[in-house]
Amino acid sequence: MPTFALFLILFTCASLARPLINQDCGSTFCGNLNISYPFRLKNQPPQCGSHNLELECEDNNQTTLVLREGKFSVQNIFFENRTIQVVDSSLDRDDCNSFPLSSVYYYSHYYHTYSYSSESEFSIMYVVNRRKPIKSSQYIDASRCTIKSNTSSLPTSFFYFLDRNTVPNLNQACTVKAEVPIMVKTISGMSTLAIYNKLT
């Protein structure tokens, strides 16, 4: 089952109240991915990194990050610009009903420099749900499925992407299902396909 939706998550060593890495820890590898401070593998001693940045190594070659929101496959760690690239495994490229419902905005509680400045090409979009369709340019259809007009089985739920700047105008019939990081300043004016392409 192919998955997609790569996210870049900011982290900072300065925000972690932990001592510097013990010289005996060094780097360890999971597959070809270098794991070193502030990250640590689950089986490493605590001084090798932060408990909040604990990763798991499955079958000695797949690094995963497990959060309450779900399991994320780690694709890369960029220590120089303090980002980690992960795949949201809840999304399936071949399933048009698959939505990015795992939120990693949770990271802002750990990393104080997780910010969204106006210069940043990184923002948060919302996945919202409602029982009836809505016609508004602010609500971007999140479904990749084609609905035939002559079908009797219309969806019982409609999902939309909503830009973070339009949340104050959230329709009362909508429910926010997830906050999803995306590598653009704003999703306003983007097509459904363009948004999913930014998540790959």
Image: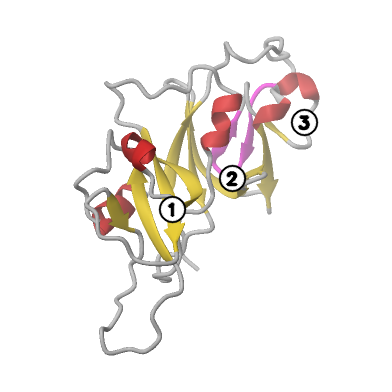
Q: Secondary structure at mark 2?
A: loop
**Which is nearer the eye, 50 or 166?**
166
CA gap between label 1 and label 2 equals 37 Å
Which residue does the numbered mark 3 point to in the structure image? 44
Q: Position of residue 122 (x, y in %)?
A: 35, 32
Q: Kindly identify which residue carries mark 1.
A: 128
Judged by depth in the image, the label closer to the viewer, 3 or 2, is 3
Indicate yes or no whether the magenta region holds residue 165. Answer: no
Earlier residue among tags 1 and 2: 2
Q: Give percent across and percent down for residue 41.
A: 70, 35
Sequence-earlier tag: 3 or 2: 2
Residue type, numbered disc 3: Gln
Secondary structure under tag 3 reads loop
Type of residue at label 2? Gly
| Residue at image mark 2 | 31
Can residue 200 be seen here? The reply is no
* Residue shown at the point (34%, 20%) measured from the top left: 117
Which residue is at the front of the view, 26 or 158?
Answer: 158
Q: Are marks 1 and 2 in contact (CB under 8 Å)?
A: no
Residue shown at 51% from the left, 53% from the top: 101
* Above or below, 150 relative to 106: below
Looking at the rendered structure, the kind of residue marked 1 is Val
Tags 3 and 2 in contact by the CB under 8 Å rule?
Answer: no
Instruction: Look at the image and give the residue range highlighted in magenta.
Output: 25-35
